[in-house]
Amino acid sequence: EIVLTQSPATLSLSPGERATLSCRASQSSSYLAWYQQKPGQAPRLLIYDASNRATGIPARFSGSGSGTDFTLTISSLEPEDFAVYYCQQRDSWPPTWTFGQGTKVEIK
Amino acid sequence: QVQLQQSGPGLVKPSQTLSLTCAISGDSVSSNSATWNWIRQSPSRGLEWLGRTYFRSKWYNDYALSVKSRITINADTSKNQFSLQLNSVTPEDAAVYYCASGSHYVSYWGQGTLVTVSS
């Protein structure tokens, strides 16, 4: 079973700064996604297949990486981007999904 | 645009069965390209995928090992919905439960149901 480790746990930044979030997997997988979650809401898909933006996601969000090391970058933080971000992978066998523990991006 | 509407009780007694339903609009539960999932979220366990059901000429189910002995996910084609049953709940099962659609990732989420386990 895949284990996803996200770092850092918390990122304290100011609006306009660049955010770089990391997700490391215990096994290689082709299917890596990133989600954003705000309080009281369900997560929202941002990035799929490691680097493809989901429909309606602004260009300041980008994903990169392959194999076991992946990165979500927010090029210039907007006030609405302060939230918790999760990575997720699908394992082929057993056919399961695994989520990381999350990175909170907070206002400095 | 797929919409998922969850229903079910928010309070379950220990040792009893948690039952939730997810009504689908904008797609068919028996679509050959869709996959229907249940995910939960708690402070202690984070986001945890529980299982899925999908139709590919016949019905299939996959379940997380952590709940495999206690979980059933079923589809109801007459009502275009799918359901979650989790037996023998304990306080560890208290969480926000989400239904979700997607094969490799979640494209659409239900609104979430906060389930408390208490007598």
Image: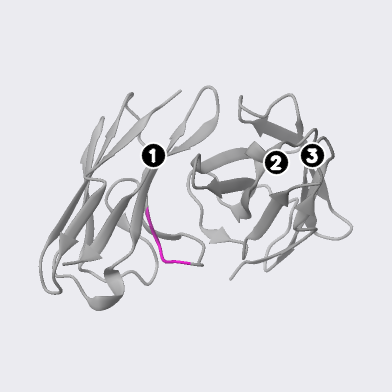
Q: Do the residues marked 1 and 2 share a common chain?
A: no
Quadrant hosting residue A28: top left
Q: Report the amino acid beneath label 2.
A: Thr
Label 2 and label 3: CA atoms lie apart by 26 Å
Residue annotated with mark 1: A31
Q: Is residue B17 above or below residue B4?
A: above
Q: Report the amino acid beneath label 1.
A: Tyr
Q: Do the residues marked 3 and 1 share a common chain?
A: no
Label 1 and label 2: CA atoms lie apart by 19 Å
Work out whether mark 2 precedes mark 3 in sequence or the reverse, and give the earlier one. Answer: 3
Q: Is residue A38 magenta?
A: yes
Q: Is residue A16 above or below residue B15?
A: below
**Chain designation of label 2:** B
Quadrant hosting residue A30: top left
Residue annotated with mark 3: B14
Q: Position of residue A65 (x, y in %)?
A: 20, 41
Q: Are marks 3 and 1 in contact (CB under 8 Å)?
A: no
Q: Which mark is residue B53?
A: 2
Give the SS element for disc 1: loop
The residue located at (65%, 58%) in the rendering is: B114
Q: Point out the stretch of residues depicted in magenta.
A: A35-39
User: Which residue is at the front of the view, B13 or A57?
Assistant: B13
